[in-house]
Amino acid sequence: MDELNSGYSPELGDWVTLTTVFQPLEAFMLRGVLQAAGVPAAVADAHLVQAHGLLAPAIPVRVLVPERCKVQAEEVLAAFHRGDFRLDEAGEDDMKDGTLP
């Protein structure tokens, strides 16, 4: 695991797999979303996928969370997939008199 992963806290339980993806970039993005929502998260197996490029389609990258945070993490993940964290291309703050600056 790398230095951007959340630290291990024994009181939160063991790390469990929240989801698996086949692109390391997607796993890192999901880790960031979870961490921004206050859920400790880690990515595992990303370097294995990068080291074995020919096997990459067969090796999933795991996004891990502490066992006691899994329900909250599932809610954050569902909100992400629904688009709750999506940014509008032209927010109200960007518009002046109905036109972009």
Image (cartoon, helix red, strand yellow):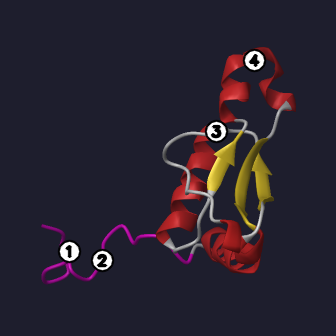
The residue depicted at 19 percent of the width and 77 percent of the height is 95
Alpha-carbon span between mark 2 and mark 4? 42 Å
Magenta stretch?
84-101
The residue closer to the viewer here, 84 or 76, is 76
Could you give the CA–CA distance between mark 2 and mark 1, rounded to whole angstroms? 5 Å
Mark 3 is on which residue type? Pro
Q: Give x and y (percent) for residue 79.
A: 63, 77
Residue 81 in the image: above or below residue 21:
below
Q: Nearer the viewer, residue 98 or 43?
A: 43
Residue type of the residue flagged with mark 1: Asp
Mark 3 neighbour density, 10 Å: few (under 14) some (14–19) many (20 or more): many
**Mark seen at residue 64:** none
Q: Earlier in the sequence, mark 2 or mark 4?
A: 4
Image quadrant where one finds the C terminus: bottom left
Mark 1, secondary structure of its residue: loop
Nearer-N-terminus badge (3/4): 3
Give the distance between the C-alpha atoms of the residues marked 2 and 3, in whole angstroms.
30 Å
